[in-house]
Amino acid sequence: MTTTIPKGSTVLVTGVSGYIGSHVAAQLLEAGYRVRGTSRSKAKAQDLIDYFTSKYGADSITVAEVPDMVATNAYDEAVKGVSGIVHLSSVLTFSTDPEEVIPPSVSGALNILSAAMQEPGVKSLVVTSSSTAALLPQPNEKIKVKVDTWNDAALEAAYKPGVDGFTVYAASKTQAERELWKAIAKEKPHFQVATVLPNANFGTRFKVGGNSTGDWVMALAEGKDDPLQFPPQWFINVDDDAKLHVAALLDSEAAGKRLFAFAAPFTWNDVLAILRKLEPGKKLVGDRDMGEDLSEVPNGEAEALLKKHYGHGWTGLEETIKQNAGPVLIQ
C-alpha cells in the first residue's frame, strides 16, 4: 500500500457539517490528520467543531467559510496549505428547476478541481458523487450497473415538464461527475482523483436533523410513513462510507476510480422488522409490498479498499439501523 498523504497533514473537507462530511472529518481526525472544513457559515458548524476539538485537540480542526461554492475562485483560499481534499458540498435544494441545480453542481465540482490545481501541495482529491449518477432505484428491475454507467435517463427527464426534484438532483450529480472526469482528462492534474458514489447512508448521527437519509430511519422509528415515498434501494453504513472516502484519499490504487459505496439492497420492511426487534410493542407503520432492488452493482473494488485499510467489509443492515436509532453524539 502506498499512502499518498503523511499523518499530521491538513485535509480539506468541504461540506463538513453534513451527514457524510462530519463522519469523514471524524475518520480523518481518528487517523491522525488535521481537518480544515468548509461551511456556508462558521456558526453552522460550531457545535461540530466544539465536539471534535474537545476530543482531538484545539488545533485538530478549523472551518473556512465558503458561502457560495459556485462563485469563481470559491475554494482558492480554503485549499492553501492542504495536502488532500474531500469534496462533499452539493446542491440539496431538490428544486424541480434544472437550471437552479445542474449548473451550480457542475460549477462546484469544477471549482474544487481548479483550486486544487493551483495548490502544489495537493496530492489527492476525492469527490463525492452519488449512486444516482449511475441509476435511480427501479424495484424488481434486474439492472446491471458497470463502472462506466451514467444516468442519462435522469438528464433527459430533468428538462421535461412535471419532473420531480429527486430526478433533477440525480441529473445534477450525473452531469457534475461526468464533467469532472472530462476536465481531469483534459487538464491532467498533478494529484490523483477518485469519486465515491454512495447510496442511502444510515448509521450513527452526530446531531438531530440535517436533512439526511439518517433521518428516514428516525421518522419510521417515530411511527411516520414519510420514508415510504422512497423506493427500495441499496444502503451503506455512514461510517463505512466515510472510511471509504479516506481510503480513496490515501491509497494510490484508488486513482482514477469510480468507487461504488453500496453495501447491500434493503426494503423498508427490513428496516421496520429491525425497529420492531429493538422496541417490541412500539406502534410503527405496517409492512408494504414495494418490491425490491434487484440491481447488480460493481461494489467489489470499494469493499476491497475498506478491508485493506480497516480490516472489515460492509457493516450489515441490522447493526447499521441499531446505530441509527441510538442517541446522537452531540447532546
Image (spheres, rainbow, N blue to C red):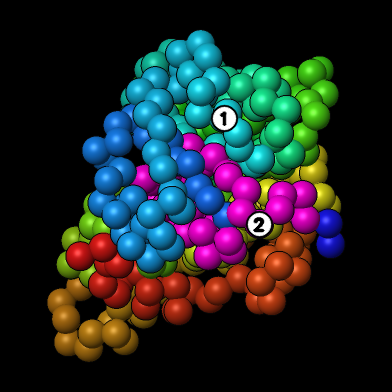
Mark before the other along the chain sequence, 2 or 1: 2
Q: What element carries label 1?
A: loop
Task: Let me know if residue 173 appears in the view.
Answer: yes
Cα–Cα gap, marks 2 and 1:
18 Å
Answer whether residue 331 is magenta in the image.
Answer: no
Q: Is residue 151 above or below residue 57?
A: above
Residue 276 as seen in the image, left or right of residue 309: left
Q: Name the residue furthest front.
A: 58
According to the picture, the residue beneath numbered tag 2 turns out to be: 7
Residue 103 % position (x, y): 50, 15
Residue in view at x 44 percent, y 79 percent? 318
The answer to whether residue 4 is magenta is yes
Q: How crowded is mark 1: few (under 14 residues within 10 Å), some or many (20 or more)?
A: many
Q: How far across and down, in percent of the image, does residue 302 sit?
A: 71, 58
Along the horizontal axis of the image, is 327 left or right of 187? left
The amino acid type of the residue labelled 2 equals Lys
> What residue is rendered at 50% in x and 29% in y?
78
Quarter occupied by residue 278 = bottom left
Compared to residue 127, the image places residue 20 above or below, namely below
Q: Find residue 174 and name its label.
A: none
What is the quadrant of residue 288 in the picture? bottom left
Disc 1: which residue? 79
Q: Mark 2: few, some, or many residues within 10 Å (few <14, many ≥20)? A: few
Q: Read off the magenta span.
A: 3-32
Q: Are the two marked residues, 2 and 1, in contact with CB atoms closer than 8 angstroms?
A: no
Residue in the foreground of this view, choosing between 140 and 296:
296
